[in-house]
Image (cartoon, rainbow, N blue to C red):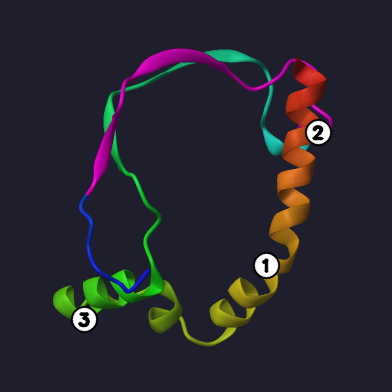
Amino acid sequence: MDGARTNEMARIDGETFVMGCDKPIITADGEGPARPVTVNTFWMDVHEVSNAEFKRFVDDTSYVTEVNQYHGIYYVLVFHIQYFYQLLLFVLAMQYAQCQ
């Protein structure tokens, strides 16, 4: 994508669903107990935000990102956390599967 704006949004209808699990694999993560949660209707972009579009937003609004605000150790942590993100997704998927 060339960074052009699409401004395409989709309406996500609100609903009530069961969040959490009564048999969590990792109890310290706060996933238990299972409980009903209601999410209000909201709008979401159809496409993910590209780096070019986010840069345009930052440039147009003078938004200060957390990386720019806390450049030191925060930047290092964010950089290294990305490698553990896949592991986190795997653990969450396993926990979800156990609750089913």
- Tag on residue 59? 3
In which quarter of the view is residue 11 placed? Answer: top left
Disc with the residue nearer the chain's start (1 vs 2): 1
Q: Mark 2 = which residue? A: 94
The boundaries of the magenta stretch are 8-27
- Tag on residue 37? none
Mark 2 neighbour class, 10 Å CA radius: few under 14, some 14 to 19, many 20 or more: few
Q: What kind of residue is marked 2?
A: Met
Residue 56 image position (x, y, % from top left): 24, 76
Mark 3 neighbour class, 10 Å CA radius: few under 14, some 14 to 19, many 20 or more: few
Disc with the residue nearer the chain's start (2 vs 3): 3
Q: Would you say the residues marked 2 and 3 are in contact, meaning their CB atoms lie under 8 Å apart?
A: no
- Between the C-alphas of marks 3 and 1, the distance is 26 Å
Q: What kind of residue is marked 3?
A: Asp
Residue 18 falls left or right of residue 10: right
Q: Would you say the residues marked 3 and 1 are in contact, meaning their CB atoms lie under 8 Å apart?
A: no
- Where's the N terminus, which quadrant? bottom left
What's the residue at 39%, 73% (across, down)? 51
Which mark is nearer the camera, 1 or 2?
2
What's the residue at 23%, 56% (across, down)? 6
- Where's the C terminus, which quadrant? top right
- Between the C-alphas of marks 2 and 3, the distance is 40 Å
Q: What kind of residue is marked 1?
A: Ile
The vertical placement of 2 against 24, above or below, is: below
Mark 1 neighbour class, 10 Å CA radius: few under 14, some 14 to 19, many 20 or more: few
